[in-house]
Amino acid sequence: MKTAIIVDSNSGMTPADAKEHGIILLSMPFIVNGKVYHEHVDMDHETFFKKQVGGSEIMTSQPAFQEVTDLWNKVLREYDEIVHIPMSSGLSGSCASADMYDDEYDGKVQVVNNQRISLTQRQSAINAKFMADHGMRAKAIKEKLEETRFDSHIYIMVDTMTYLKKGGRVTPAAAAIASVLNLKPVLQINGEKLDAFAKCRGIKKAKSIMLEQAKKDVASFGVSADGKPNCWLGIAHTDNQAEAEAFKKELEAAFPGYDIRIDALPISIAVHIGPGSLAVTIEKVLPEGVQY
């Protein structure tokens, strides 16, 4: 029984990364000045941020029915079944849409709703591939990933309120005050919701709060039976590689022995928060999976 793993680009996976892990990548669409583009296909992140900062009108989107089912049909010519892992249903309608599409596939397509995005979604795909390679069927993989849906946390420092204001998520007055006071909101993703977590004066304080919360989350996940760390840590960002590298050093000092990966946040998140953000991800180890 051959089981294919499909994940969308909201996982932060690039085509090269997906190929290396034997995972099939569905590139997510977005709209710039009325034209549809696909992440990593016909617009890279560098070009995206230039257009965003330059004032282009940008909107998120989700794959069309035909785009998703054409991919499934193509994959099922080579594989017996599919595990499809979209971004969190709380952040996009693409998961609910895919869940409706799979009704026509007689169980051959299992759509996973495990409330992940960015590095935590990426790790879910890698875990799924590992399980599939060791004989687990698609339905069982879906059940395992959904059973552990709340075993991850993401904290995101937003550098500018401009794009939250533009999207109607904060009022113009609140954005103006935040700018004057140099406030850096920290948002949290745990499960399906994107919530406010803290407001900090400056990047240094925001990083400190995220680091302290990471310590609490790591402690809550405990250690494995053999005494090894029981979670994975990562850093994600929007056009903020230098700050991400600096933050990695702080995390490595706080968590010696952890292999900490840095990835770009997906465009679907960047549309709403803009450049300059910084995030830390904490995810409990899934025994049935492997790290990064």
Image (tube, grey):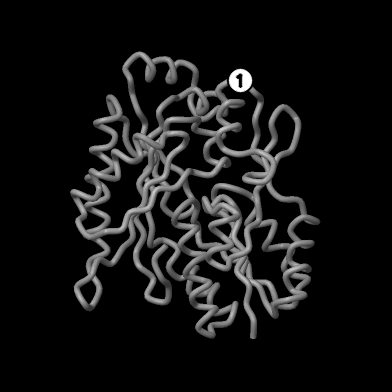
Q: Provide the residue designation for mark 1.
A: 55
Residue placed most toward the observer, 11 or 42: 42
Q: Residue at x 51, y 62 (%)?
A: 114
Residue ID at (60%, 39%): 44
Instruction: Give the percent coordinates (x, y) of residue 148.
Output: 43, 68
Residue 163 placed where, x, y %?
52, 26
Seen at 37% across and 20% down, the residue is 178
Q: Secondary structure at mark 1?
A: loop
Quadrant position of the N terminus in the picture:
bottom right
Horizontal arrangement in the rendering, residue 203 relative to residue 27 (left or right): left
Q: Is residue 208 above or below residue 218?
A: above
- Label 1: few (<14), some or many (≥20) within 10 Å? few
Look at the picture and state if 52 lies above or below 83.
above
For the point 38% across and 38% down, the residue is 278
Work out whether residue 97 or residue 119 is closer to the camera in this orientation and state it: 119
Quarter of the image where one finds residue 202? top left
Q: Of residues 62 and 169, which is closer to you in this image?
A: 62
* Amino acid type assigned to the residue bearing label 1 in the image: Gly
Report x, y in % for residue 39. Answer: 63, 44
- Classify residue 264 as left or right of residue 268: left
Q: Work out whether residue 14 or residue 175 is closer to the camera in this orientation and state it.
A: 14
Direction from residue 241 to residue 92 in the image, left or right:
right
In which quadrant of the rendered view does residue 82 lie?
bottom right
Q: Vertical placement of 110 versus 88: above or below?
A: below
Q: Quadrant of the C terminus?
A: bottom left
Total number of numbered discs in the rendering: 1
Q: Position of residue 17 (x, y in %)?
A: 53, 57
